[in-house]
Amino acid sequence: MTSAADPHPDPAPDPVPESAEAINRFHVVLVEPGDSLNIGSVARAMSNLGFHNLHLVAPPRYNRRQAAMTACWATGLLEQAREHASLAEALAPMEQVVGFTARHGRHRPQHVTLPDWIATVKTARPLETALLFGPEDTGLRSEHLSACRWLVRIPSEAENPSFNLAQSVLLALFEISRLDWDSLPRVDGPPPAREADLQRMERLVEEAMVRSGFYGKGTPAPLPGLVKHMLRRIQPDVRELPVLMGMFDHINRVLSGRSPAQPYPKTGGATEDRDGEAGEEEA
């Protein structure tokens, strides 16, 4: 405590290092983890590398005491872990969702290797990022993958392409922890929209597609997923998303008859005379 006349005021607290602040933006999200021992091993891997945000989505048989057997010195992290009833709830505050899976397909989000994804992290601001890992027996399913901006594959031998849950988390976090956040360029501009708002936009788009007849009987099964992935690749920021949502909300109001439809001008806007100046349309 110092007075205004104190010639030796208390020093200001040290700022939080950029690396620690960046690491705190990464969240390990385990979807329906079936083995409490695996959850403990994941917590230990996180603690080894300085990560703190653990989320459990609908764990069917979670026993914290059993998880502590493999967590070793990470029992405090287990106590702070957040449980969620649904994946949507866990992802709501996130700005980016990254799914880890060895599977890929034509109609899924873009699939990259772990080193390639790390290269994209180097060129962007640290985002509130969910690192999504699926159940031990099935991995991430289609309904989980649809929420992902990226799908990441950890390189391995073709004869044995998959890692166990704790290994996958450890390898991913190790690569993130190696980044020199203090030397990375700062990116200005508005932050990207959060997952909860993206989901609201997707519902508006789906409603417009159904009302307009673009989705309906005979629609190819992959089409809605392709549209959703295309919208996520745009990655609208917090300034752009309200424009998109307002646009599709108005389209839905017109399609449902809640707002009048406006005739489309023949020239696509103001009519023009022969000199190119705006004028009255000839009869």
Image (cartoon, rainbow, N blue to C red):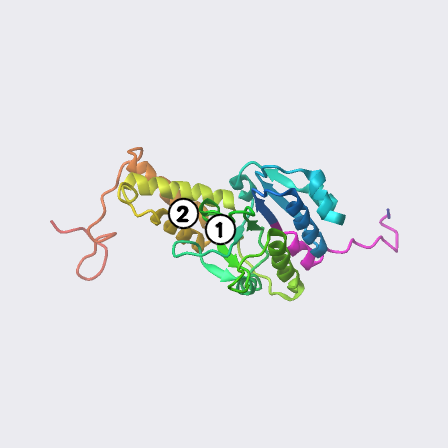
* Residue at the front extreme, as displayed: 159
Judge from the rendering whether residue 225 lies leftward or rightward of residue 196; answer left or right. left
Image vertical order of residue 21 relative to residue 260, above or below: below
Give the side of residue 18 with respect to residue 239, left or right: right
Q: Residues within 10 Å of mark 2 (few under 14, many from 20)?
A: some
Residue 163 shown in magenta: no
Name the residue beneath numbered marker 2. 244
- Under mark 2, the amino acid is Leu
Tag 2 secondary structure: helix
Front residue of 7 and 279? 7
The residue that appears at 22% across and 49% down in the rendered structure is 265
- State the extent of the magenta-drawn residues as a range: 3-27
Depicted 162 relative to depicted 265: above or below: below
Q: How far apart are the alpha carbons under marks 2 and 1?
A: 20 Å
Residue linked to disc 1: 148
Q: Residue at x 46, y 43 (%)?
A: 199
Foreground residue among 239 and 278: 239
| Residue depth check, mark 2 versus mark 1: number of the one nearer the observer | 1
